């Protein structure tokens, strides 16, 4: 979808076409920056911080992060970073890059391999010393019972051959002691774990992730957006002290239905966008307003038409003491 975004550069205003798919003006923050001017500017930073609470942006908290949603108001910001230089870009880069850190299993296997190597080397040195001592002291014999080495009688070439055979035995012990099959065994084990998780509809891109998750002892989860949908919904509606169960009761009372739809359309600051060729509508605004607008759409509200049918004369802002707000309209 093509949208015009007003960009101020060198005190001159120019319009730049952004080909950013579903990025709409005053719905998403397109870059990192600092708020210069704003009017009731509120930002939904749940995509970055995980907190569903709407954050009000002013001179005390002017920092904006790319990818966050504009819940309410409007403003002007000074762009300080785009693309990979934004907080979102740095976060994605840190996730995709390979830090080279070893997993707990690899650390333990390296420890086991080092221990086995030390033990194997120690045994090889001990065997080498013992066999050389036995050989040069004349305690080793041939198959016919004669000594393999006799001082002053054995030729130098024969003595060297005997020593080389003994050294070969020691080297063989060192080679056999090195656990070369451990990495392959670990890879096969992790591949099997990955296949089992695929059967449970869990996609694991890295084999080491299976082992890392298996080593977890405590899982701390933020329930907002993880265990919940991070989306408020209207559960009950009361009119005149009576509970309304839409759309059944509203179908029998067209006047009440029209009044409620008009109240929803005029008492909210959010917006509703209907994509071409799509059934799902996109609603922006604060979590409370989004829930109310979704309820209005459920009972048949046409947001653009119903809001344009009347004009607002005066606004009675929501008051926490009275717990109500309203508007005076002219039809």
Image (cartoon, grey):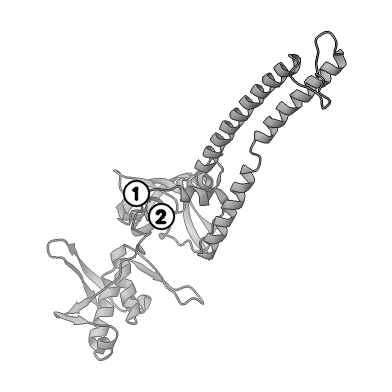
The local secondary structure at tag 2 comes to helix
Residue 264 % position (x, y): 27, 74
Q: In the image, 109: left or right of 329? A: right
Number of residues whose C-alpha sits closer than 10 Å to that of mark 1, classed few (under 14), some (14–19) or many (20 or more): some
Going 34% across and 45% down the picture, which residue do you hit? 62
- Pick whichever of labels 2 and 1 is earlier in the sequence: 1
Residue that badge 2 annotates: 47
Tell me if label 2 and label 1 are in contact, CB under 8 Å: no
Nearer the observer: mark 2 or 1; the answer is 2
CA distance for labels 2 and 1: 23 Å
Q: Is residue 325 above or below residue 148?
A: below
Residue under the point 37% across and 55% down: 46
Residue in view at x 25 percent, y 91 percent:
252
Quadrant that contains the C terminus: bottom left
Residue 43 percent coordinates (x, y): 35, 55
Q: Is residue 67 left or right of residue 156?
A: left
Q: Is residue 202 above or below residue 311?
A: above
Labelled disc at residue 37: 1
Does the image show residue 331? no
- Residue at coordinates 80% horizontally, 21% vertically from top-left? 162
How would you rate the neighbour count of disc 2 (Cα within 10 Å): few for under 14, some for 14-19, many for 20 or more? some
| Towards the viewer: 173 or 42 | 173
């Amino acid at each position: 979808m093509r949208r015009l975004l007003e960009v101020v550069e060198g005190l001159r205003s120019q319009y730049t076409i952004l080909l950013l798919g579903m990025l709409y003006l005053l719905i998403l923050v397109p870059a990192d920056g600092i708020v210069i001017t704003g009017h009731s500017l509120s930002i939904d930073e749940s995509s970055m911080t995980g907190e569903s609470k709407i954050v009000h942006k002013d001179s005390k908290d002017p920092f904006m992060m790319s990818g966050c949603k504009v819940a309410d108001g409007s403003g002007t910001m000074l762009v300080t970073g785009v693309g990979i230089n934004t907080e979102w870009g740095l976060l994605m880069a840190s996730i995709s890059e390979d830090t080279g850190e070893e997993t707990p299993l690899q650390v333990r296997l390296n420890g086991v391999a080092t221990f086995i190597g030390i033990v194997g080397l120690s045994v090889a040195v001990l065997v080498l010393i013992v066999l050389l001592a036995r050989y040069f002291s004349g305690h080793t014999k041939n198959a016919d019972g004669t000594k393999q080495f006799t001082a002053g009688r054995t030729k130098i070439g024969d003595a060297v051959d005997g020593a080389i055979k003994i050294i070969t035995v020691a080297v063989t012990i060192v080679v056999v002691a090195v656990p070369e099959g451990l990495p392959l065994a670990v890879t096969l084990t992790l591949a099997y774990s990955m296949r089992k998780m695929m059967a449970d509809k869990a996609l694991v891109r890295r084999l080491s992730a299976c082992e890392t998750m298996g080593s977890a002892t405590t899982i701390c989860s933020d329930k907002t957006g993880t265990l919940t949908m991070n989306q408020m919904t209207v559960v009950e509606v009361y009119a005149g002290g009576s509970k309304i169960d839409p759309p059944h009761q509203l179908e029998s009372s067209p006047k009440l239905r029209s009044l409620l739809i008009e109240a929803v359309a005029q008492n909210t600051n959010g917006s509703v966008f209907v994509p071409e060729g799509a059934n799902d509508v996109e609603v922006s605004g604060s979590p409370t307003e989004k829930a109310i607008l979704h309820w209005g759409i459920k009972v048949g509200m046409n947001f653009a038409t119903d809001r344009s049918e009347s004009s607002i004369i005066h606004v009675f802002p929501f008051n926490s003491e009275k717990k109500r707000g309203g508007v005076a309209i002219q039809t």
